[in-house]
Amino acid sequence: MDKQAAEHVIRAPRGSSLNTRGWVQEAALRMLMNNLDPDVAERPEDLVVYGGIGKAARDWSSYHAIVETLKRLGDEETMLIQSGKPVAVFRTHRDAPRVLLANSNLVPRWANWDHFHELDQKGLMMYGQMTAGSWIYIGSQGILQGTYETFASCARQHFGGSLKGRIVVTAGLGGMGGAQPLSVTLNDGVMIAVEADPGRIQRRLDTRYLDRMTTSLDEAIRLAEEAKEKGRPLSIGLVGNAAEVLPKMVEIGFTPDVVTDQTSAHDPLNGYLPRGMTLEEADAMRKHNPDQLVAQAKESMAVHVKAMLDMQQKGSIAFDYGNNIRQVAHDEGVTDAFSFPGFVPAYIRPQFCEGKGPFRWVALSGDPSDIHQTDEVILREFADNTHLCRWIRMAREKVEFQGLPSRICWLGYGERARFGRIINEMVASGKLKAPIVIGRDHLDSGSVASPNRETEGMQDGSDAVADWPILNALINAVGGASWVSLHHGGGVGMGYSLHAGMVIVADGTPEAARRLNRVLTTDPGMGVVRHADAGYEAAIRTAQETGLDMPMLDS
Ligand code: NAD
């Protein structure tokens, strides 16, 4: 561990005075630091934020250089970040992004983990995941509403609108997977989440995302069945290995209502513990025999997916939760691995067609009351959206802030620009104590090409077309986003995705108002356009009703 990191825990500055030369630079500084706050990041001592080895900066010297550069960066300059390392500052103009980031991008022929790890070890690259390398990760809440929406949609499709009296089995309680238990209990269901690392389970207990912990499968099943019987929500973290526990469940005839998975299967070297191995043994093998570890992890994933398929055969609703585990199992010879769908085509795409996705904002003041005031705005301005208002009320009551106070909710085309304008006015009038940072996940409607996830099974077969995230990044940069990023390999691993991020600061100025209006229109607009172009009726309708200019829409 870096000496300085060991001695000084990183936390973003709070309050309304600047450590930099402007609020956009200040926002980038605070959000980079917030990504590495021990309350937010999974392994801040290694610069790892979430999602396997998703990092905020390439190494500690890069981190310090980014911080120093942000402190001196002028309002007419732009810093360039190449895979977590600051490589240049150019003179640009006031409306240009202050930071442009490109993380983990490889020429397609070389776009695999082997080549990436080689470059990573040489210190030439880092894995940016999605919001880790683009400095807009906000802890498990960031994924909470999406996960809640997914389970809500699953409940609507299969169980009459509620998970009450239903048991969901999953694995992985990491940075994102940790949102699963609370999402299920918010939908009134019962969850057993298998997690190899008891420390991760404890963390979810500490933040109230999880209710119970046990090391016994029998106890987990007994508790789950009791709660199911009584129709009471309950989440149980079960210490164990999914590749051992799920086959055991099949063997003893336990069939959950729903089965999914959020281990970091996208990264067989760092993200998936092979069966029959302790965490310490895996750590040692990662250093001394990485090829063997990868082989064993892949073999275990095949066993894991076979158990999910067995459960599906016996009546469970099974879906892949965006970690590419089906692909690995398929490559290992499980020919029917794709017999269960990914969560996007199964549950999320209709929202993408309206430009909806995981929109989020963060109070740079550090004061929770700033977020509570924005909650009130949502409840007032979007009062007709009962689903959204229900979410905001639940989030306010149940979600613990991690790091800087933040909120997430799925807003779509038109709604985002409207909300951005209101926030900027609140900052201008002094209602909020400091500016607000607005951003989103890369897992959004118009910012990602990922054929095993966000663009799986596109209606026109355009799953692998990656022009869209590139256009998304370009138009958002032109519009004046505060920072824009283009990444490869997030979510599903090297070779399987390209995606773009954008963040924009509402500092209360008229210039920010103009930038917000442009960017919060182009960004979700790209989602509507991407899906309308692919022929989705709902997206075509949205484009027509909102007057989006698509020259070939009618042809
Ligand atoms: P993470 O690396 O923080 O956590 C993964 C967890 O899985 C760890 O706690 C690890 O101990 C556990 N684990 C690994 N192998 C296991 C095994 N065999 N049995 C039981 N537990 C095991 O990752 P994360 O941020 O939680 O993300 C999880 C996965 O979900 C990633 O592949 C990520 O790309 C994917 N993902 C999902 C979404 C979504 O919308 N759901 C979005 C982005 C990414």
Image (cartoon, grey):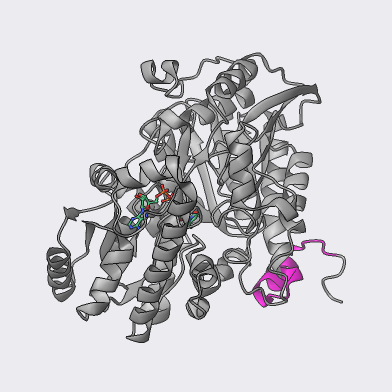
Residue 32 visible in the snapshot: yes
Assign the N terminus to one quadrant of the image.
top left
Residue 533: quadrant of the picture: bottom right
How many marks on residues?
0
Which residue is drawn at the image coordinates 67% and 41% (left, top)? 485
In the image, is residue 91 part of the stretch drawn in magenta?
A: no
From what the image shows, is residue 264 above or below residue 518? below
Residue 445 drawn at (x, y percent): 62, 59
Figure check: 490 above or below 515: below
Taking 115 as reference, is 466 left or right?
Answer: right
Span shown in magenta: 532-550
Magenta stretch, main secondary structure, is helix
Q: Nearer the viewer, residue 199 or 460?
A: 199
Q: Report the quarter where the C terminus lies.
A: bottom right
Residue at 45% in and 47% down = 270
Residue 159 seen in render: no
Look at 52% across and 31% down and name the residue there: 31
Q: Nearer the viewer, residue 427 or 494?
A: 494
Q: Nearer the viewer, residue 307 or 552?
A: 307
Q: Residue 424, image x and y in percent?
A: 59, 35
